[in-house]
Image (spheres, rainbow, N blue to C red):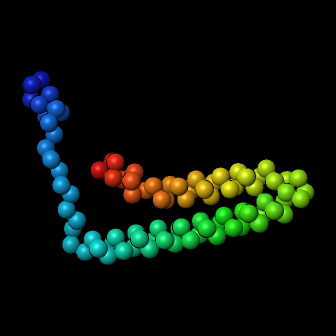
């Protein structure tokens, strides 16, 4: 039994994922969603920059930097999503 388990773990069978029929429509929706999120991220950076500009005059700019970090973190996650999924699959 132990030999069977170690042989399966040592040499897993090759897996080649094949998309189901109609997967190109799902891929198109995912591409649209990624584009929309990226566009909203650019708008978010512009808005945080304007917020930082107005708050920096009053000395309250540190709050805007955390918002900028959140926006940039979200954009990094969206842009790295396909690579993350590729590593997991």
Q: Residue furthest right?
A: 58
Residue 12 point in image, percent of width and height: 16, 40
Residue 40 point in image, percent of width and height: 59, 69
38 or 25: nearer the eye? Answer: 38
Residue located at (66% from left, 64% from top): 45
Q: Residue furthest top?
A: 2
Eyeballing the image, is 10 above or below 13?
Answer: above
Residue 1 point in image, percent of width and height: 9, 25
Residue located at (21% from left, 72% from top): 21
17 or 1: nearer the eye? Answer: 17
Eyeballing the image, is 56 above or below 40?
Answer: above
In which quadrant of the rendered view does residue 72 lie?
bottom right
Residue located at (68% from left, 56% from top): 68
In the picture, measured across the screen, residue 60 lies left or right of residue 43, that is: right
57 or 25: nearer the eye? Answer: 57
Residue located at (21% from left, 57% from top): 17
């Amino acid at each position: 039994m132990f030999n069977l388990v170690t042989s399966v773990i040592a040499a897993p069978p090759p897996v080649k994922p094949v998309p189901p029929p109609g997967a190109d429509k799902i891929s198109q929706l995912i591409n649209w969603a990624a584009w929309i999120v990226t566009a909203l991220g650019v708008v978010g950076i512009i808005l945080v920059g304007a917020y930082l500009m107005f708050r920096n005059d009053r000395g309250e700019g540190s709050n805007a930097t955390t918002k900028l970090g959140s926006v940039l973190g979200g954009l990094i996650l969206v842009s790295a999503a396909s690579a993350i999924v590729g590593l997991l699959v």
